Amino acid sequence: MTFVLDPAATAAGYRLEVHDSLGSTSTQALTRAKEGAPGPLWVVAVEQTGGRGRRGKGWSWIPGNHAASLLWPVPAGLAPDRVATLSFVAGLAVERALHRACGPGPDGRAPDFRLKWPNDVLLGGAKLVGILLEMETLPGRGTVVTVGIGINVTGAPEGLPYAATSLADAGYTVDAPGLFRLLTAAWVEAERLWDEGRGFSRVRQAWLAAAAGLGGPVSVQAGGRSVTGIFETIDEGGRLVVRPAEGNRIAVSAGEVHFGAAASAA
């Protein structure tokens, strides 16, 4: 099976480049932007040797996993804080694509895919998907965003400081090309819902319906500071809202998040 766009993505003007091997799909997407390639453009690698995650962390590669990045041109006048909410569009699109790809699990029940703030997808509480949003202004060409999406399809790396899993580990027979095609369709749906940020309230509602840890204990570590309390919601700016045991609610823009029992230990 080869990587192709869903017809809905093609009709919406998306293009596709597939590479046998790349260091990083996001780096390649940005390179293509600097070369003048128009977006929106999906860049896919059958093998990715130098993937990266948030805060410069590496993203380990296992053959058969999913590595793709979207080059997305930012419309003139769209504020950076609105652009940042594209990470929720990505999470929602991935979650929908996963449900469509997997259907009921081996036990007949719907898979427990959950969206972890700000930009991971969990399966059974373990990390399944990493999403990395990067924005850069190119001289004479405006601002572009790359949305990198790594999905553990065939296997998950070992020796990580957190639990990780793959679709294969959970008993789902899915391949990366089939999942990618579903993702490109789900992205178009979620982006239209978002509507350049004007529809973020709708995206926010859908995201919260699949949120991990909502209503439970949460601890956020950011810049040497720890915020602990109850994960109450995300606000209209996409910030995580924590209700501490005492004092006013706190809106957090970025940080490492721990839920449940891990929140107490963090």
Image: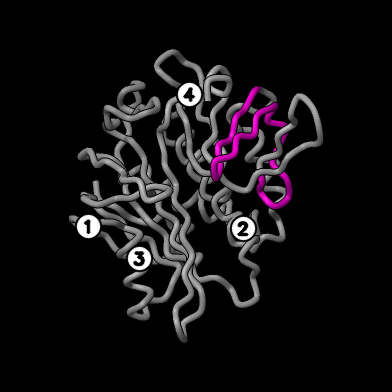
Give yes or no for contact between labels 4 and 2 (Cβ–Cβ under 8 Å).
no
Residue at x 45%, y 83% (from the top left corner)? 139
Q: Residue at x 33, y 55 (%)?
A: 4
Q: Examine the rendered structure and indicate whether residue 202 appears above or below residue 74.
A: above
Classify mark 2: helix, strand or loop: helix
Above or below: residue 126 compared with residue 92: above
Residue farthest to the bottom, as pictured: 140
Compare marks 3 and 2 and give the one earlier in the sequence.
3
176 falls in the magenta region: no
Q: Residues within 10 Å of mark 1 (few under 14, many from 20)?
A: many
Which secondary structure dominates the residues rendered in magenta? strand
- CA distance for labels 4 and 2: 29 Å
- Res. 26 in view: yes
Callouts 3 and 1 close, C-beta under 8 Å? no
Answer few, some or many: residues within 10 Å of disc 2's Cα (few below 14, many 20 plus, some between 14 and 19).
some
Rendering quarter of residue 195: bottom right
Residue 22 on image: x %, y %: 22, 57
**Mark whose residue sits in front, 4 or 2:** 4
| Foreground: disc 1 or disc 2 | 1
Amino acid under disc 3: Ala
* Spatial separation of the CA atoms under disc 3 and disc 2: 22 Å
* Mark 3 to mark 1 CA distance (whole Å): 11 Å
Magenta residues span 217-239
Q: Name the mark nearer the viewer: 3 or 2.
A: 3
**In this image, 68 relative to 191: left or right?**
left
For residue 29, the mark is: 3
Front residue of 235/35: it is 235
SS at mark 1 in the image = strand
Q: Where in the figure is residue 35, as x and y percent of width and height?
A: 33, 79
Q: Which residue is mark 1?
A: 22
Q: At 44% across and 51% down in the image, what residue appears?
A: 132
Q: Type of residue at label 4? A: Gly
